[in-house]
Image: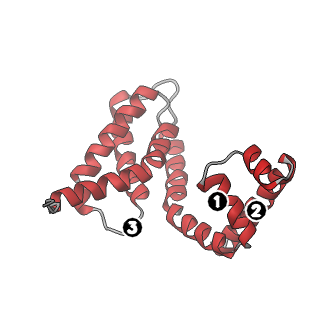
Amino acid sequence: MAEQPDNQDLRTRRFLSLLMANQRQISSYIGVLVPNFNDADDILQETITVMWEKFSQYQEGTNFAAWGVRIAYYNILRYRREKGKGKMQLSDSVFQSFCQVMGKKYSRTDEKLSALRSCIQKLAAPDKYLLHLRYGMSQTVYSIAQQSCQSIQSIYRALTRVHQILHRCIHRTLGEEGLP
């Protein structure tokens, strides 16, 4: 008879699932703000450790990446204090402005994903199928062209058209009409 996972196992699984889905965003945020790869990697590891320690404080259903980015922000501030101002380091005011812009970017990720899902549902069946082949099945444009007896250029044109439709739909959905 299989054992039922205890609460700690479930907590660990939930954390790892969320981390795996969002680690690239958190890592990217750190990488943009910390120029040295080794230092950025150390900060990512410290951030993940703090996230695990404070996981009980995470509000389920909120943006995990934004929560992780906020923790990374404080680790980066500590790093800047400890390293001192190097020749290649941004001024505090520029750094703060940059952090605000980056933080806003990550705070809307869930909204954008939700809008993308909604917009994909609105596509015509052939467009959904094309996206499924290309991204869901990870097929190359060449293999899609061969399967559908179309030219590679026509598949590229169709993908570009679908990307444009989705881009406009996402911006409309989020109320960002004037954005590029």
Q: Which residue is mark 1?
A: 132
Q: Earlier in the sequence, mark 1 or mark 2?
A: 1
Give the image location of residue 156, x and y in percent.
81, 51
Q: For the residue labelled by badge 3, is the local secondary structure a helix, a strand or a loop?
A: loop
Q: Distance of mark 3 from mark 2, alpha carbons?
A: 30 Å
**Foreground: disc 1 or disc 2:** 1
| Amino acid type, residue under disc 2 in the picture | Val
For residue 24, side relative to residue 62 (left or right): right
Q: Earlier in the sequence, mark 3 or mark 1?
A: 3
Residue 62 - label:
3
Colouring method of the image? secondary structure
- Asked if labels 1 and 3 touch by Cβ distance under 8 angstroms, the answer is no
Instruction: Name which residue lies at 50% across and 30% down.
Output: 35
The image shows residue 99, relative to residue 118, as above or below, that is above
The image shows residue 29, relative to residue 174, as above or below, that is above
Q: Which residue is mark 2?
A: 162
Instruction: Name which residue lies at 43% across and 52% down.
Output: 22
Q: Residues within 10 Å of mark 3 (few under 14, many from 20)?
A: few
- Asked if labels 2 and 1 touch by Cβ distance under 8 angstroms, the answer is no
Q: Residues within 10 Å of mark 1 (few under 14, many from 20)?
A: few
Q: Based on the displayed image, in which of its 4 quarters is residue 83 positioned?
A: top left
State whether residue 83 appears in this view: yes
Q: Earlier in the sequence, mark 3 or mark 2?
A: 3
Instruction: Name which residue lies at 22% across and 60% down.
Output: 10
Q: Distance of mark 1 from mark 2, alpha carbons?
A: 12 Å
Q: For the residue labelled by badge 1, is the local secondary structure a helix, a strand or a loop?
A: helix
For residue 121, side relative to residue 70 (left or right): right
The image shows residue 40, relative to residue 152, as above or below, that is above
The image shows residue 100, relative to residue 173, as above or below, that is above
Give the image location of residue 53, x and y in percent.
21, 50
Instruction: Name which residue lies at 49% across and 54% down.
Output: 103
